[in-house]
Amino acid sequence: MEEAKNTSKDSEPDDPAPQNNFLSSAKDFFLEVSLLSNFTLRFFREVFFPRYEFNELIKQCYRVGYRSLPLVGITGFIMGLVLTIQSRPTLAEFGAESWLPGMVAVSIIREIGPVITALICAGKIGSSIGAELASMRASEQIDAMQVSGINPFKYIVITRIAATTLMVPILVIFSDVIALFGSYAGVNIKGDVNFHLFFAQVFNILKFSDVFPAVIKTFFFGFAIGLIGCYKGYNSNEGTEGVGISANSAVVMGSLLIFIIDMIAVQVASLFM
């Protein structure tokens, strides 16, 4: 009898829990993609039609852009300084120390400046938007707007996405300029390079094909940051607990989307170079 019991136990199928967990995760992923796609399509359906909330747009541009300048400026300066200091020994081994300004400038303008600044904005701006909208949802402010005849999607979502789309490229350009000044300071730590000579070398190396794709992709970075932040906050259904969840998931999804957009942008730009 014991042998029969052991045989029956051995013949039982494996635990279906891992398979069920995988199917549940896949279902949640595709559901999230579907909801985000519908949210994006709704944005494009409503953004081009009145009523336009210009006052709210200006307010959000001020909050997104001006209030982020100190953090972006400090980050850019440190980024240029550290990159220059770390690159100098390698170039010095090959006797190519004179290439340092141009190499750092291309690295910052093409890739490091836009991506790092966008990640900083995703952490600061994306989390702020997600938490703010989730708080408004929990306190029923969004429902109150609908009752009073105001379109909350236009007033809340479209203005914030438009503000991030417009302001993030400006913040990236500001960060790149500050990073070049940081690079100039780094070059002069162990040397004595004239200001005009440094920037002459920088602009001799930089090309239109370096600057234009880097600027264009920052608009997509800004759009992604605003879209994810608004999506997570606007669709929060967890009450007060959802405020923290929305802020955290907005940063995570926004950062991941920035890397995906950057990967696609690099591939597209390489086709025309």
Image (cartoon, rainbow, N blue to C red):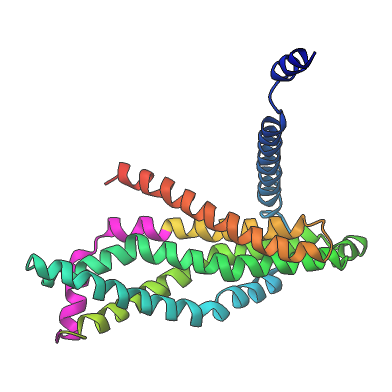
Q: In this view, does 261 lie to the left or right of 48?
A: left
Up-down relation of residue 231 to residue 205 (above or below): above
Q: Quadrant of residue 121?
A: bottom right
Q: In which quarter of the image is residue 105?
A: bottom left
Q: Quadrant of residue 136?
A: bottom right
Specify the farthest residue to the right: 147
How far across and down, in percent of the image, does residue 164 sit? 58, 65
Q: Is residue 265 left or right of residue 33?
A: left
Up-down relation of residue 135 to residue 224 (above or below): below
Quadrant housing the N terminus: top right
How far across and down, in percent of the image, does residue 180 sit? 30, 76
Up-down relation of residue 269 to residue 63 (above or below): above
Is residue 96 shown to the viewer in this render? no
Is residue 267 shown to the viewer in this render? yes
Q: Which residue is drawn at 76% across and 12% down?
A: 4
How far across and down, in percent of the image, does residue 28 sit? 70, 40
Up-down relation of residue 12 to residue 151 (above or below): above
Q: Residue at x 40, y 75 (%)?
A: 76
Out of 208 and 243, give the one closest to the viewer.
243
Out of 157 and 51, give the one closest to the viewer.
157
The secondary structure that dominates the magenta segment is: helix
Residue 213 drawn in magenta = yes
Magenta span of residues: 191-215
Q: In this view, does 70 lie to the left or right of 138?
A: left
How far across and down, in percent of the image, does residue 134 sit? 77, 64
Q: Which residue is drawn at 53% across and 58% down?
A: 255
Q: Residue at x 67, y 33 (%)?
A: 18
Residue 242 drawn in magenta = no
Specify the farthest residue to the left: 95
Count numbered badges in the picture: 0
